[in-house]
Amino acid sequence: MTEEQKLLEKLRRVEALFAGTDADGERDAAAAAAQRLRDRLAELRRQDPPVEYKFTLADLWSRRLFTALLRRYGIEPFRYSGQRHTTVMAIVPRIFVDETLWPEYTQLNDVLRTYLDQVTTRAISEGIFGDVTEARERPALGTPG
């Protein structure tokens, strides 16, 4: 199994966790899981009226993941004119953000960040220089020590 296949399997497991299924990530099961979450969102919209949220996501990878999650659930991500590219706006029920969207995003983001860190470290180590440790810290100029 390639590193990318391992990553996709981890992402499917996280999705299955939030969709309430124990399926192993087959395409049909993943589609059914996403549909169950969209159905839950529709029910929550009736119970808990959607409100406008402002999310600030620091990097391109996180924004791509978050906007993909929103779109998968039928939620349109947007920004107002003049807002930074780090901003993603969405109109969604609070309970869905608190119980599903944000927890799922943070878990998926952790998986992706770990993967991207491993790939980046390996590429730098193998392609540029083997020592990829952080720069050591020194006392500031003019301070004793």
Image (spheres, rainbow, N blue to C red):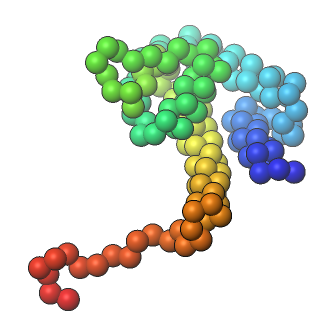
What residue do we see at 61% from left, 14% from top? 74
> 59 or 44: which is nearer to us?
59
**For the view shown, which residue lies furthest in the front direction?**
128
Compared with residue 89, is residue 7 higher up or lower down, i.e. above or below? Answer: below
Instruction: Identify whether 122 is placed above or below 83.
Output: below
In the image, what residue occupies the spot 58% across and 43% down?
109
Residue 106 occupies which quadrant of the picture?
top right
Q: Residue at image x 57%, y 62%?
A: 128
Residue 111 percent location from the top left of the image: 64, 48
Instruction: Classify residue 75 as left or right of residue 39.
Output: left
**21 w.r.t. 89: above or below:** below
Q: Residue furthest bottom?
A: 145
Relative placement, left or right, of 134 versus 32 is: left
Please name the residue shown 82% across and 50% down the image.
Answer: 2
Q: Nearer the viewer, residue 19 or 30?
A: 30
> Where residue 123 sits in the image (x, y, percent)?
63, 57
Q: Quadrant of residue 108?
A: top right
Q: Is residue 5 visible?
A: yes
